[in-house]
Image (cartoon, helix red, strand yellow):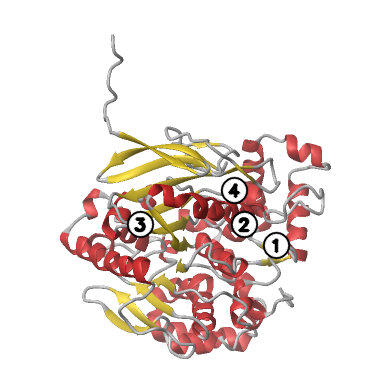
Amino acid sequence: MQPPLPLIWRPKTLVKAPSGTYTGTLQRNVLVYRGIFYGSAKRFMAPVEVKNRQDPDQAYACPQVGLPWVTRDEDCLHLNIYAATSERPKPVLVYIHGGSFMRGSNNDLSIQGQRLAAGTDSIVVTVNYRLGVFGFLDFSDIDARFSSNPAVEDLLLALRFIKKNIAAFGGDADNITLMGESAGGSLAALLSTLLSDDTFHKTILSSPVPTAFISKEKSDERTHAFMKTADLSSVDELCEMPAATLVETAAAFCESSKLGFSTFSPAVDGALVTKTPLRMQHEGLVKKRPTLIGVTADEMSFLQLPLVADRWGIRNVLPRQLERESEAFIEKMEALYEEIFGKEHHLTQLYSDLIIRVSTAWYAAETAAKQDVWLYNFAHAGPLVSRTPLKAFHTIDLYYLFDTLPLPMRIPSNRQMVAMIQNDLKQFFHTGRLPWQRASKDLLYAKHYRQPPQFCSMLNPSVLDFWRQSKHYKNRLNPSFDDD
């Protein structure tokens, strides 16, 4: 007697790659290979490559708060591959998820890659890496066996694994685009500075925070403060603590330190990372790669939702950043934002600029001085979301980039926007070019995704000029982190 068929039966395919044999299924005319492990790592240590290991039926995520529907395990270094079925070698997109360096997974619903791969005739790879205390605290001063930047080493290993194996899945190993959103965008910017070879060839940064890096000194202070919060006095205690307890302690540390979503960050450790990405671009020390950089029109609009704002500790950011500035500067800032955005929206726009858009614009300007850079500002919210306070919120562009809009939002006007942005992505993946004017250091010319699309500066020039006068700007450019 044969076993019953599963509720959804899909034909399977086998791929023999240099690192092993992997199983995929055909879904929506795209071959999907889930749960391919590229590495493994002991807690806080550098990862090592894993060969011939796959668990397609289990969605592993790094231990974190939330994600009750997936298995949270420190053994989480895997990737998913979505491959269009055309016979020619296809361009490859490697995507790094966001989540403030402490949340998220490559199985998040917004970044399922089937429709993006099909719509752009490409291969989409989504990568898991260690998060929070497991990936972004530096315990190397406590024990030399530990890595100073575990998550960064995870991603470096993943990129090398993809480079070596992707041709077996139909990918063009000489046409790889690295993309990240939010914290993932920060990491993609960092990887662009760490790799000067042809491991990847183009870069997309979506709402990144390219200044989200801390000094070695501050990193060590943060690590020791965490040890105190956790009431740990030895390496053995740290290594033996259950992962769930470490996550709970990290959440308490986020709250007690008042650092909120900025608790965990990559460190300029002086070994793997010697300078910030912004400084590397400023000094022209980065391999030239075609680059697409974008933001959304209302990044921090979820400040309007008190529960979300409190969970992420966003309201602590502004006082912490402005403590460096003079009273006269703060008065000018408040007047400028009220004049441009009005009293109702000026605070949301101020946070959007301070947390994401201003540093992204600085990074774009430094990059555009020496490389081919195109910019976008995603301003389309659709008829449903535009009626809410959220508008074009942080991450909304992902639902259009990946074509993962929830069913109620799959209406004609939104579908047109999906087609527009995927058409641009397809051209960028395949050719490394885009059909609008490149940005320059002095002109941040951008495509505004709305209906109909418009072209103007990525950020209000008055706002950008104003922030260039701030200590915040000078501090972010300074490689020694003076006054940090």
Report the front residue among 236 and 190.
Answer: 190
| Few, some or many residues within 10 Å of mark 4 (<14, 14–19, 20+) | many
Amino acid, disc 1? Leu
- Amino acid type of the residue tagged 3 in the rendering: Pro
Mark drawn on residue 89: 3
Question: How far apart are the two marked residues, 2 and 4, measured between alpha carbons?
Answer: 9 Å
Identify the mark nearer the N-term, 4 or 1. 4
Residue pointed to by mark 4:
130
Outermost left residue: 412
Q: Which mark is residue 272?
A: 1
> Closer to the N terminus: mark 1 or mark 3?
3
Give the label, 4 or 3, closer to the camera. 3
Q: Residues within 10 Å of mark 2 (few under 14, many from 20)?
A: many
> Residue 386, can we see it?
no
Judged by depth in the image, the label closer to the viewer, 3 or 2, is 3
Q: Quadrant of residue 423?
A: bottom left
Q: Nearer the viewer, mark 1 or mark 3?
A: 3
Compared with 200, 282 (above or below) is below
Mark 2 and mark 1 in contact (Cβ < 8 Å)? yes
Identify the residue at horizontal 29%, vertical 13% (top origin): 2
**Is residue 28 in view?**
yes
Cα separation, mark 4 vs mark 1, equals 17 Å
Q: Mark 3 or mark 4, which is nearer the start of the sequence?
A: 3
Residue 152 is marked as: 2
* Pointer 3 or 2: first along the chain: 3
Instruction: Work out whether 369 lies above or below 423.
Output: below
Mark 3 to mark 2 CA distance (whole Å): 29 Å
Would you say 296 lies left or right of 265 here? left
Of labels 4 and 1, the one closer to you? 1
Residue at 40 percent of width and 78 percent of height: 374
Pick the residue in front: 31 or 105: 31
